[in-house]
């Protein structure tokens, strides 16, 4: 058990280091691009256009509409995946071949690494990391906002996943092909949904503690990489089909967009109320 935990921590360190290396590699190009004259000119024109737009239309409504459009688009993708699973067609045709191919190419050493990866997206690891991070950021900021964000991001999502699992009732791949024992229904992958949301929550909380854009980019890139690895690990271990993982990712992205829009509205209202009190 201790070896698995240490291996998982090592994977986290490697993931963060890789994300940081990528950010550092692309930062010069990004700096050159954003510092170019045509970008600066476009920014000036964009600001002028925005000033004109906000004189005609409330900026909050525009951003809210964009957020709603994003949520609708992601939800539509999830519905398409769900429809394919229910009808057992389209993308689900690759499910069994992929699971069988991976089962035929497993090795004991790789199994240990993948199990450590999948444990990072498990309930125990995510709960410990999220509670610790939420508690620390709430204490540092003297605010219940991180706590509300954590409950909304992960707590409600678990109920949504459970409800969909029961409603769809899809069976998992055959138990003899599973490296680890899992029970319950298969679609969507709870690990894929929870890890995407949990890692995103951790990245979000990191951004609340610093204004360093390099740290921001590293946190979000590491979160994305971790979510991809955990989802892929579920297919490798034979406990989920690829469509289960895809469904988990799209569901997680949809809920993350919902939370982001809700958080933005909350902060805008809080700022407006604060401005109202100061002007009174």
Image (tube, rainbow, N blue to C red):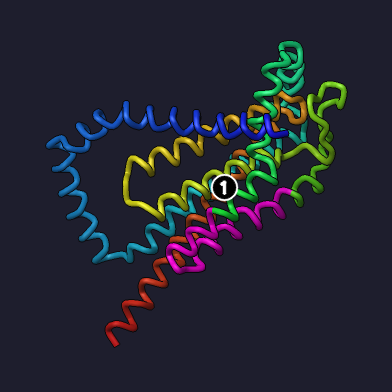
Looking at the picture, tell me which residue is in the foreground, 274 or 70.
Answer: 274
| Rendered image quadrant of residue 101 | top right
Q: Residue at x 37, y 59 (%)?
A: 62
Counting from the top left corner in percent of width and height, residue 53 is at 25, 60
Farthest residue in the front direction?
A: 2
Counting from the top left corner in percent of width and height, residue 206 is at 44, 49
Q: Residue at x 39, y 63 (%)?
A: 61
| Rendered image quadrant of residue 215 | top left
Q: Give the prevailing secondary structure in the magenta stretch.
A: helix
Question: Would residue 162 be found to the left or right of residue 228 on screen?
Answer: right
| Any part of residue 80 in sight | no
Question: Would residue 272 be found to the left or right of residue 184 on screen?
Answer: left
Q: Residue at x 25, y 28 (%)?
A: 29
Q: Is residue 197 above or below residue 30?
A: below
Q: Give the range drawn in magenta.
A: 133-161
Q: In this view, does 191 lie above or below 148?
A: above
Q: Is residue 141 magenta?
A: yes
Looking at the picture, tell me which residue is in the foreground, 4 or 27.
Answer: 4
Q: Is residue 156 magenta?
A: yes
Counting from the top left corner in percent of width and height, residue 12 is at 54, 34
Query: How many other residues sit within 10 Å of disc 1, few (<14), some (14-19) or many (≥20)?
Result: many
**What residue is disc 1 on?**
254
Q: Is residue 30 above or below residue 270?
A: above
| Any part of residue 45 in sight | yes
Q: Which residue is drawn at 40% across and 54% down?
A: 209
Counting from the top left corner in percent of width and height, residue 201 is at 53, 50
Q: In this view, does 25 lie above or below 56?
A: above
């Amino acid at each position: 058990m201790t070896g698995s935990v240490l291996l998982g921590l090592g994977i986290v360190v490697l993931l963060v280091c890789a994300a940081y290396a990528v950010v550092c590699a692309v930062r010069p190009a990004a700096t050159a691009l954003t510092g170019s004259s045509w970008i600066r000119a476009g920014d000036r024109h964009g600001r002028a256009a925005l000033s004109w737009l906000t004189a005609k239309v409330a900026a909050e409504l525009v951003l809210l509409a964009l957020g709603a459009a994003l949520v609708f688009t992601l939800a539509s993708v999830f519905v398409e995946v769900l429809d394919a699973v229910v009808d057992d067609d389209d993308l689900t045709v690759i499910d069994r071949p992929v699971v069988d191919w991976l089962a035929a190419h497993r090795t004991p050493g790789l199994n240990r690494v993948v199990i450590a990866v999948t444990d990072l997206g498990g309930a125990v690891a995510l709960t410990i990391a999220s509670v610790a991070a939420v508690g620390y950021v709430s204490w540092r900021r003297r605010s219940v906002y991180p706590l509300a964000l954590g409950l909304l991001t992960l707590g409600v999502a678990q109920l949504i996943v459970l409800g969909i699992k029961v409603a769809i009732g899809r069976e998992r791949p055959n138990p003899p092909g599973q490296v680890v024992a899992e029970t319950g229904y298969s679609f969507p992958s709870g690990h894929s949904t929870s890890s995407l949301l949990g890692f995103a929550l951790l990245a979000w909380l990191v951004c609340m503690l610093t204004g360093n854009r390099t740290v921001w980019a590293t946190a979000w890139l590491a979160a994305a990489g971790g979510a991809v690895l955990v989802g892929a690990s579920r297919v490798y271990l034979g406990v989920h089909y690829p469509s289960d993982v895809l469904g988990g990712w799209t569901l997680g992205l949809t809920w993350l967009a919902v939370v982001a829009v809700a958080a933005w509205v909350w902060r805008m209202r809080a700022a407006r109320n604060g401005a109202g009190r100061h002007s009174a």
